[in-house]
Image (tube, rainbow, N blue to C red):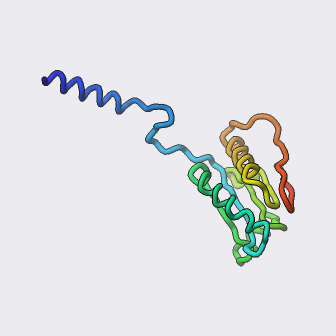
């Protein structure tokens, strides 16, 4: 009986040491990427983007270092908008760990295109980027790659 208990305990210990793919208990390391949205509460394009940005925040905030939403109708927001050269809202930036602008979208975009925007930013900062960039279509603005 003692031998059976020892064997069961040994197997339980070994099983606890095995990490199945996708079942790691260790937290994933966040990509060194900052997502910034400059918005104005009165802007119809910004209002249209609110549910998309909320969905993006839920999906990507756990995966990237920083997810910032900056209201340009505040004094602090206006200063930051001026610092980044924001002239229209919404405007979205992706910054690397050093604060360098990797990518920018000015104007509203679909959720699919915003996912592509963030995913390629993550690929850029993690060294997984391949191929050339495609232009992301927007309404009321332009996409710019750095």
Name the image quarter holding residue 47: bottom right
Name the image quarter holding residue 109: bottom right
Residue at 67% from the left image edge and 45% from the top image edge: 122
The answer to whether 144 appears left or right of 75 in the picture is: right
Looking at the image, residue 129 lies above or below residue 36: above
The x and y percentages for residue 146 are 82, 49
Name the image quarter holding residue 132: top right
Residue at 58% from the left image edge and 47% from the top image edge: 30
The x and y percentages for residue 106 are 82, 60
The x and y percentages for residue 91 are 78, 62
**Which residue is more in the foreground, 7 or 131?**
7
Looking at the image, residue 78 lies above or below residue 36: below
The residue sitting at the top extreme is: 3
Q: Quadrant of the N terminus?
A: top left
The residue sitting at the left extreme is: 1
**Which residue is more in the foreground, 112 or 10?**
112
Residue at 46% from the left image edge and 37% from the top image edge: 23
Residue at 75% from the left image edge and 72% from the top image edge: 40
**Which residue is more in the foreground, 52 or 61?**
52
The x and y percentages for residue 80 are 73, 68
């Amino acid at each position: 009986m003692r031998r059976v208990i020892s064997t069961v305990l040994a197997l339980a210990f070994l099983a606890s040491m095995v990490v199945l793919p996708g079942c790691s208990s260790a937290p994933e390391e966040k990509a060194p990427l900052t997502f910034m949205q400059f918005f104005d509460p009165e802007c119809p394009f910004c209002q249209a983007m609110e549910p998309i940005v909320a969905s993006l925040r839920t999906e990507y905030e756990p995966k990237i270092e920083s997810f910032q939403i900056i209201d340009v109708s505040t004094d602090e927001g206006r200063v930051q908008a001026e610092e980044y050269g924001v002239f229209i809202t919404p405007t979205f930036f992706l910054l690397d760990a050093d604060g360098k602008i990797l990518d920018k979208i000015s104007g509203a975009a679909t959720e699919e295109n915003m996912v592509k925007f963030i995913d390629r930013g993550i690929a850029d900062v993690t060294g997984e980027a391949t191929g050339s960039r495609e232009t992301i279509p927007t309404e009321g603005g332009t996409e710019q790659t750095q």
